[in-house]
Image: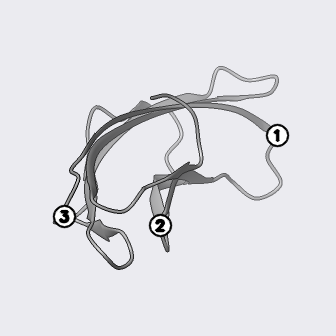
Amino acid sequence: TEGFPYTLPDKTACDVIVTIVGKQAASANMTCMDFRGRYYRNGGSATLVGSVIAGSNQHNFSTETATILLSGNTIAPQVTGIAATNISWKATMQVQPIATAT
């Protein structure tokens, strides 16, 4: 499954991989960040297993932040840019879910 936000159904576990790319306008500044999170839901709200893992993060500006946000049962990438800076962002999210009947 690709796309976001993703709502985790009940009785489901999933692996989520997010890649975020940003390019500052009129500059050579760019960033590429990868994150991975594992989640499950069994009768209540979705739960993150452990913590979100940052992977290969390469950039030549470093005050931006990004992660995978979990809100209730909804999973989505979240990025915070740099104040007074024009940055174009692109994110992809891959979700590999597995569900059980009980």
The answer to which of 31 and 35 lies nearer the viewer is 35
In this view of the protein, can residue 64 be seen by the observer?
A: no
What's the distance in space between the residues labelled 3 and 1, CA to CA? 34 Å
Residue 72 position in % (x across, y down): 49, 74
Task: Give the label, 3 or 1, closer to the camera.
Answer: 3
Residue at point 54%, 40% (across, down): 61
What's the distance in space between the residues labelled 2 and 1, CA to CA? 31 Å
- Quadrant where the N terminus is found in the figure: top left
Residue 10 position in % (x across, y down): 36, 62
Kind of element beneath mark 2 = loop
Tell me, yes or no, whether the two marked residues, 3 and 1, touch with CB atoms within 8 Å. Answer: no
Horizontal side of residue 62 vs 45, given as left or right? right
Q: Which residue is mark 1?
A: 86
Residue at point 57%, 54% (across, down): 78
Name the amino acid type tagged 1. Asn
Tell me if residue 25 comes above or below residue 33 in the rendering: above
Residue 5 position in % (x across, y down): 59, 48
The answer to which of 82 and 55 lies nearer the viewer is 55
Q: Which residue is mark 2?
A: 73
Mark earlier in primary sequence (3, 1): 3
Q: Which mark is residue 49?
A: 3
